[in-house]
Amino acid sequence: MSNQPEETQEPEQPAQAGAQPQAQPESEVAPTDYYAYVLASLPLMTREGAALDQEALRRCLELSSSYLATDTTTAPERGMQSWFTGFDRLADVVVALHGRGQLEPTTMSTASRACSECWSVAGSWRELAPCRDGVRKIATRLKRLLDENGKTYKGETIYAP
């Protein structure tokens, strides 16, 4: 025999008839914000006196379709605007690089692919159909930068859907 007291277990209480199970608190997912991401990324792309890091710009462009889906689902009331504003700022950077003669064909191709992917995502859900107008505006601006044939940039073939 041991001198230690026995542990007693509380018997489980039977569920009361008609009692509703307690609802678990819903976990909230923080909304994404492509515009905030772009604003935070732009200073990291430049170093004093150095050319803009176009590889980092391409990474931001490659995320545009993902942010389109997440911005609009995690913040339905403002998601379309935050996504469009972020994507539009990146298009501004692409246009500015072109104006300086610094835009790389690979970056132009990535921007074209981003437009295509965003167009597809926006067409996948009825609620996102208005985003196609934003994609169209950006794609039209970027298309003006192409060579006369509309299929190349600086003589190099770019992505076309």
Image (spheres, rainbow, N blue to C red):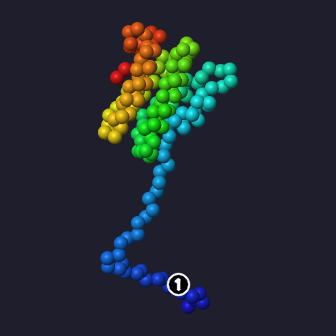
The percent coordinates of residue 144 (x first, y second) are 43, 15
| Figure quadrant of residue 5 | bottom right
* Residue 7 sits above or below residue 117 on the image: below
Q: In the picture provided, is 53 more to the left or to the right than 127?
A: right
User: Picture coordinates of residue 45 (x, y %)?
Assistant: 60, 28
| Residue that sits furthest to the right in the current view | 48
| Residue pictured at 38% horizontal, 33% vertical | 131
Q: Assign the N terminus to one quadrant of the image.
A: bottom right
At x 47%, y 30%, the residue is: 87
Q: Residues within 10 Å of mark 1 (few under 14, many from 20)?
A: few
Q: Specify the quadrant that holds the C terminus.
A: top left
On the picture, is 128 further left or further right than 50?
left
Q: Label 1 sits on what residue type?
A: Glu
Q: Is residue 124 above or below residue 93?
A: below
Is residue 117 something that shows in the picture? no
43 and 157: which is toward the camera? 43
Q: In the rendered image, which residue does mark 1 sit on?
A: 7
Residue 27 appears in view: yes
Question: Where is residue 41 shown, x and y percent of the image?
Answer: 57, 33
Residue 96 at what x, y percent from top left? 54, 19
Q: Total of numbered circles in the picture?
A: 1
Residue at left offset 46%, top offset 15%: 145
Label 1 SS: loop
In the depicted view, which residue is nearer to us: 85 or 24?
85
Location of residue 67 with respect to 91 vertically, above or below:
below
